[in-house]
Image (cartoon, rainbow, N blue to C red):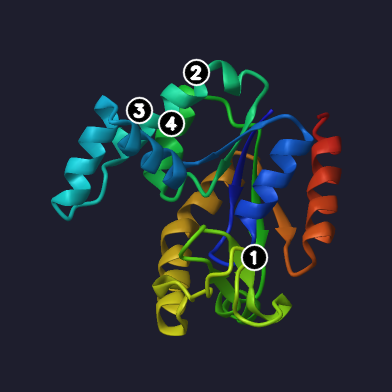
């Protein structure tokens, strides 16, 4: 089964995608992680992407799609996959459909106030990279002993701008999958366990 997980910053799609992928033996693909890995490995596509980034430009859809298709054609994707946060634009959705079959696009949704609160509580360890939730921590230290920090793009004014950009770009993508009958909306204003249970029921209905 090939799935797309869509949703705004703070909705928890990354953590959920990792969990569902593990439970159903699917390949979890985050295009951001994939892009960084290709660059670190020095592949031809990675070098091309790095050139765009170093020149201050966005990596073109064609380069992202080529990287993605190479991953989807690998043995690790043979049982199916979850695309985490991709496609982000209507053009990406259309290009993706030219090459692969997507069974369902699961849209995780929550009120903006909830999303901003979740983002405001996110912390990351600069030493080991582990993520934390501020109100669940006892102090400000990571398990490794380093003090956690708030990422620049998680600060309130930046987070609100990110949500506005996401909503503007993603609305046509949601309409696209709705028109093709593949869009499934999920109320993500719940615990991780609750949202995971909802998605599991959806997969059961889809015959997974």
Q: Secondary structure at mark 3?
A: helix
Q: Secondary structure at mark 2?
A: loop
Q: Earlier in the sequence, mark 1 or mark 3?
A: 3
Q: Which residue is mark 3?
A: 66
Distance (Cα) linking label 4 and label 3: 5 Å
User: Residue 73 got which mark?
Assistant: 2
* Above or below, 189 relative to 101: below
Distance (Cα) linking label 1 and label 3: 38 Å
Mark 3, other Cα within 10 Å: few <14 / some 14–19 / many ≥20: few
Query: Looking at the picture, how far across and down is residue 58, in whole percent?
Result: 25, 51
Query: Looking at the picture, how far across and down is residue 159, in whole percent?
Result: 46, 75
Q: Are marks 1 and 2 in contact (CB under 8 Å)?
A: no
Left/right placement of residue 83 relative to residue 26 reads left
Of the 4 image quadrants, the one containing the N terminus is: top right
Q: Which residue is mark 4?
A: 68
Q: Secondary structure at mark 4?
A: helix
Mark 4, other Cα within 10 Å: few <14 / some 14–19 / many ≥20: some
Residue found 83% across the figure and 29% down from its top: 207
Q: Secondary structure at mark 1?
A: loop
């Amino acid at each position: 089964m090939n799935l797309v997980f869509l949703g705004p910053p703070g909705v928890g799609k990354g953590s959920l995608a990792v969990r569902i992928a593990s439970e159903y033996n699917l390949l979890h693909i985050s295009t951001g992680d994939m892009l960084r890995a290709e660059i670190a490995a020095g592949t031809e596509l990675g070098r091309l992407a790095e050139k765009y980034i170093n020149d201050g430009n966005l990596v073109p859809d064609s380069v992202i799609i080529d990287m993605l298709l190479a991953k989807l054609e690998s043995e690790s994707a043979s049982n199916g996959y979850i695309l985490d946060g991709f496609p982000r634009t209507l053009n990406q959705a259309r290009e993706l459909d030219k090459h692969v079959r997507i069974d369902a696009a699961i849209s995780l949704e929550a009120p903006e106030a909830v999303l901003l609160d979740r983002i405001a509580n996110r912390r990351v360890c600069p030493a080991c990279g582990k993520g934390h939730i501020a109100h669940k921590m006892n102090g400000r230290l990571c398990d490794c002993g380093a003090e956690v920090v708030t990422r620049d793009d998680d600060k309130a004014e930046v987070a609100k701008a990110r949500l506005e950009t996401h909503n503007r770009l993603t609305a046509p993508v949601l309409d696209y999958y709705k028109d093709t009958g593949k869009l499934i909306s999920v109320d993500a204003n719940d615990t991780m366990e609750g949202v995971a249970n909802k998605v599991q029921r959806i997969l059961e209905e889809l015959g997974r």
